[in-house]
Amino acid sequence: MAQNVNFDLSHPAVEAGLESPADENVVHDSFSQLIAEQSQNEGLSDAIELQHLQGNPDDDEGRDNVAYLSPSENRGWRIGSDEAAEEDNETQTDSLLKDRWSSATLKILSSMPSRTIGRSRGAIISQYYNRTTELRRRTQKRASIKDFSRSARPSIRGYGVEVDTTDSAEKKQERLVKNLQDLSAVDRMRMLKEMPLNLSEKKDLRRLTLEMTKRTRSSSNLPCCSYLKFQIILALRHSWYSCLSFLHSLQLWQMPLKRVGGRFGSGVLSYFLFLKTLLFFNVFLFLVLGSFLVVPQAVYPPELPESRKPFTGLELLTGGGYFSNTLLYYGYYSNHTLPNCPKNNSTRPECDSRSLSYNMPLAYFFTIGLSFFITCIILVYSMSKSFGQSFRIDKSNGMLAMKVFCSWDFKVIKRSSVKLLSENICTQLKELLGDTHHRLVRNTILDKLIKLLIHGLSWTLCLGATAGCVAGIYCFSDYMHKKQESSENDSEDPGLLKEASLLALPVLVSFINLMLPILFQLTAWMEKYNSPSLRTFVSLSRNLILKVSVLGVLCFHWLKRVAGSANGNKTFNCWESFVGQDLYRFLVIDFIFSLLDTLFGELLWRLFSDKVLKRNRRPGFDIAKNVLDLIYGQTLAWLGLLFTPLLPAVQILKLLLLFYIKMSSVMMNCQAPSRPYRVSQMTTIFITLLCFPSFLGSSVCVTYTMWRLPSSGSCGPFRGNKTMIQAGKQRIAELVDENRSLSFLADAHTYLVENPLFLFVGAAIFLIVIYFQSQVVDGQRKIIALLQEQIENEGEDKKFLITRLQSVHERKRTPARNLPSQDSGC
Amino acid sequence: MGTTASQLAKDSLSEYQELTFLTKQEILLAHRRFTELLDRDERNHPNPRVPMEVILTLPELKSNPFKTRICQVFSTSEDKDGSLTFEDFLDLLSAFSDSATLEIKSHYAFRIFDFDDDGTLDYGDLEKLVNCLTGETEDTRLTSEEMRQLISNILDESDIDKDGTVNLSEFQHVISRSPDFVSSFKIVL
């Protein structure tokens, strides 16, 4: 970009600027020498004036017109800043936007690398040339830190300074092509994709690179085996791409998601994406459990002790009756090797060949464990990825710039939603601007006290309501349990009413889950919060406390009461199946109540609002509440995995139906959210909630069940009153006895898993790694602060140079001021 | 090398797949939508160019306040009239696609927001940007006092070298702090 002016960028004085400031005398001297040369050099300023008189030769290929401010814009800016004119006089050299620069100075300003790096093609090519060099250097040999010049500025060391050189465009392109050729094919493609050039230029670069590659390859005779390897790699990559595009074309629900995103923006879309994620989790669980547990058991069904009850419609709700002794529940699964061949009776055809034998208890044990383990890994991975995207190292000193640059959602298509989005942004900006004022307004002590009192009151109300409802659930479940135990002693046939009474507890719990959040919302109306995100957090935490306590009391009910009363009662003889049925009921009733909630909360409210209140505002879609409901349902599904292997299938059906119902309800009844919603942060929070209270809680319950609770004696894969883990260990010991080769597994288990020293050492290493990472983060923060300071200093240098240049220029012009037409910038 | 009348050549398709962030389905869909915008006689051109007014009838761009700037940034026409060829259209979709990197998106976002095309975001650019964001109606516009305060706050926060404008690096620095940018800078056909 130094084509128009004789500023020699590769002047040794510039290079000297990168050395240690101990050489400062050298630096200053050479710069002032340069400027002194300029003032003596008439030809230089003449060249500038001559260029200006001849107009602006558009010789730079990629550069657009308008390199400098036109005089009319200058005047406009000046008028606008009249109020600030007094302050401006002192700070004249502070901004480089002053209108008193001559047009030549403005031309120099506009051709500065920092302004052209994004636009001019030559600059982009140079930038990517430097990057490919960096990449080549990194892949070929690690440059040691000693190779870089010692500099007091720690930032320059090790970071490539991406300067534009003064070569012509073709030469730059040649060098870039040569660099591209030396990279591996994957890197080359990535580099080409990431270049912000237009497609025809990228095609040229690619063509040139391929030509050069072909030339060099044909000139060097490759041995045939590496050529073959090259072809194999190409074929593999081609098949990988076609596989990826096949997966992409399978995308579920792409059109509906696009419609929702186009109308409601990213916030509501994130709910549906979360639903899709949960669906994939459940599909995975269903496939694993189905293929390892359900299918083998379905092929070799066990002998049933009692005949199956007739099918009435109530089974779909209660899960009992016809469904009780089916693949759905734990009780159906056999506790021996399939096929079940008694030692002396070999009339069954499968018993002849001993090749296929499938140890059901072991399979059950390991499948459940494995599915939980893999789900845990996937969850932790997605949580860390999501967290990594939203965590920022440097403390942001304000949100305004970020809001202005990043808040426009380009996905929104519908005109009314665009209008809403604009209003939303306007409100947020005004609020943020108001914040910077109101921070100075002090509240009186009385105000603060009243606010504190209101907050305390609402928290007490909410927590009290939660505690009351939880106690109610506890007492009611106790009552129902006792009623069921006592009714066992009656010898009458269990009628439909008795089956339906099993639904009472789920209905009560779902009712509480529906009503209490409304109460929380009402109390939130009377409170005043400083920021909308605080309001969201408070409401989220209240709902979370409610759901966690409800689930806690239910787990207590199942694991202590129901499991504890296993002895004696007929119904609770197979307590695992009973718990599985209970969980099935909870899942189905939860689904029905979500339907009711959608119906009343959205459809009827919209009709009411339209017809009766005659308002034009439709209800908004409460994203947080709906996502919490999804998480609650998924927790139930995870809890029930041990007791009901087919529960993921039920959950899949439920999620599919929920998707379509919610989608149509949202499209018909709701409007785009009027309050700001930080998508990325909320998604991180939801995934964290899915991982920590939800998954962790259910895996703790399942582990407790397997470890401590004696399994029931008459049904399921772990019959005989021992805990599941003991039964599992016994089976493994038997297996090891049969095949000596597997003894190393048992040894590994004894020495690694049960040895506390191993766990201790593992935890210590983990903590050390965390400590190192936090130190790295601290160091990076310090570097950021140093770099910012350095950039400010460079800015000062730039201003200094430009003002000196301008003053030199004006000094030259003053004697020749006879021609007023020359100076159009003032 | 342009596109034939009704179909994309296979090697063009694989070339576009390698050079842009779009998948094969997305490229084919883009080709279909692009040819729908052409007149009957234009379809036989080797490299047809669609004028800006026709591009702006696409539903994905119709209500976007930045629609004219988007067309101007991606246009390679000599007259700077915002008309797009098929390759320009692919460039547009690639920059706005799911898999485009943060750097590409921030680069093009900067160019879209740079209304006067001078390589930096100065006061006038920022003012036009805020007006586009807040909409055209009177009650959502900011007053001039608010505007001045807003822009001076923005420059305080993002102008690191204190030259009164936001250049590309400073813009990218601000963008990198916002995790929502990548998901909101998306247009899907």
Image: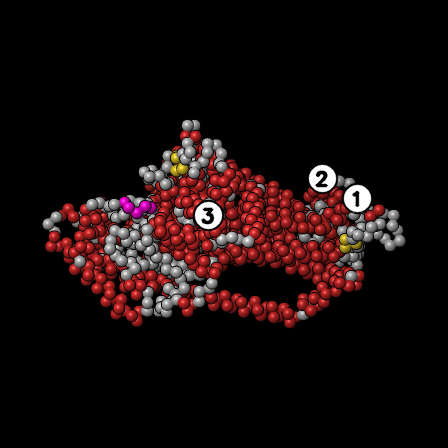
Q: Which of marks 1 and 2 precedes in the sequence?
A: 1
The chain to which mark 2 is attached is A
Q: Residues within 10 Å of mark 3 (few under 14, many from 20)?
A: some
How far apart in space, not on screen, are marks 2 and 3 (Cα)? 69 Å
Residue at the spot x=69%, y=69% of the render?
Answer: A751
Give the extent of the magenta segment.
A58-62
Q: Which residue is mark 2?
A: A313
Per the image, is A132 magenta?
no
Residue at the spot x=29%, y=50% of the render?
Answer: B123
How far apart in space, not on screen, are marks 3 and 1 (Cα)? 72 Å
Q: Is residue A171 left or right of residue A628?
A: left
The chain to which mark 3 is attached is A
- Residue A190 position, x and y percent, is 47, 51
Which residue occupies the foreground of this view, B164 or A813? A813
Above or below — where is A464 with respect to A409? below
- From where the camera sits, is residue A8 visible? yes
- From where the camera sits, is residue A510 visible? no
How far apart in space, not on screen, are marks 2 and 1 (Cα)? 15 Å
The chain to which mark 1 is attached is A
Residue type, mark 3 in image:
Leu
Q: Which of marks 3 and 2 precedes in the sequence?
A: 3
